[in-house]
Amino acid sequence: MSDQDLEISLIVDSQELAKSRHRYYQVFAVYVAVIYKGSGKFEFPADLRLEFVRHHDIVEGFFDPIELQNRLQNDVDSKIFETERQIKKHPETSDEKTAILRQYQKEIAEFIEFLTTQYLEPATLNPGNPEAHGYVFFATQNKWIRPLNDHEDFVLGLWMKDRIWQFPFSLPPTPGDLILRAPPE
């Protein structure tokens, strides 16, 4: 979508519903790119909200990346404590439990790294810095949304002080929709 000063693009993986079911906390991800074409400055708030249309129009705010990182780190700390406790009870399983813990720590560290480097953040856009882009995550685990259906309808709202930009989309895409995916090798 675009107007005279602003262009906003939304990119969603056609398989995001399936991917979100396997992600930590089953978060739903979208990629947003904003380009400012004006001559002054523009305060981009990065305030996005996702409406789950088939779930009685429930609207979820974006997952705060700092909060998500803290939850992930707390989970790692709990897993370390639990693993150490299990190893004390059953020392013969030490190697197996340690290997599982290392893999878990590696996956969490990679996800936290992704969050810190790829998350969409509020920005002041101007002709010298006209673009903001990144991923935004939304929670899907609450009593009003879970479980996600095989087909879902969404409306992504980008809230600004003087207007709301809304992007309706459905997943999986209907036949005939444009799907950009590399062919299998």
Image (cartoon, rainbow, N blue to C red):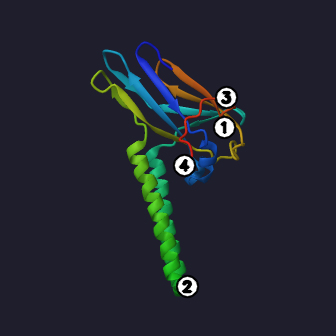
Disc 1/disc 2 C-alpha distance (Å): 47 Å
Identify residue for label 4. Answer: 185
> Which numbered disc, 4 or 2, marks the residue closer to the eye?
4
Residue ID at (37%, 25%):
43
Dot 4 lies on which element? loop
Disc 4/disc 1 C-alpha distance (Å): 22 Å
Cβ atoms under marks 4 and 2 closer than 8 Å: no
Compared to residue 74, the image places residue 52 above or below, namely above
Identify residue for label 3. Answer: 176
Q: Which of the numbered marks, if any, corresponds to residue 172? A: 1
N-terminal label among 3 and 4 = 3
Query: What amino acid is labelled 4 in the image?
Result: Glu
Disc 4/disc 2 C-alpha distance (Å): 47 Å
Query: What amino acid is labelled 2 in the image?
Result: Lys
Residue furthest out toward the front: 185
Q: Residues within 10 Å of mark 1 (few under 14, many from 20)?
A: some
Identify residue for label 2. Answer: 89
Query: What amino acid is labelled 3 in the image?
Result: Gly
Compared to residue 127, the image places residue 46 above or below, namely below
Quadrant in the picture for residue 151: top right
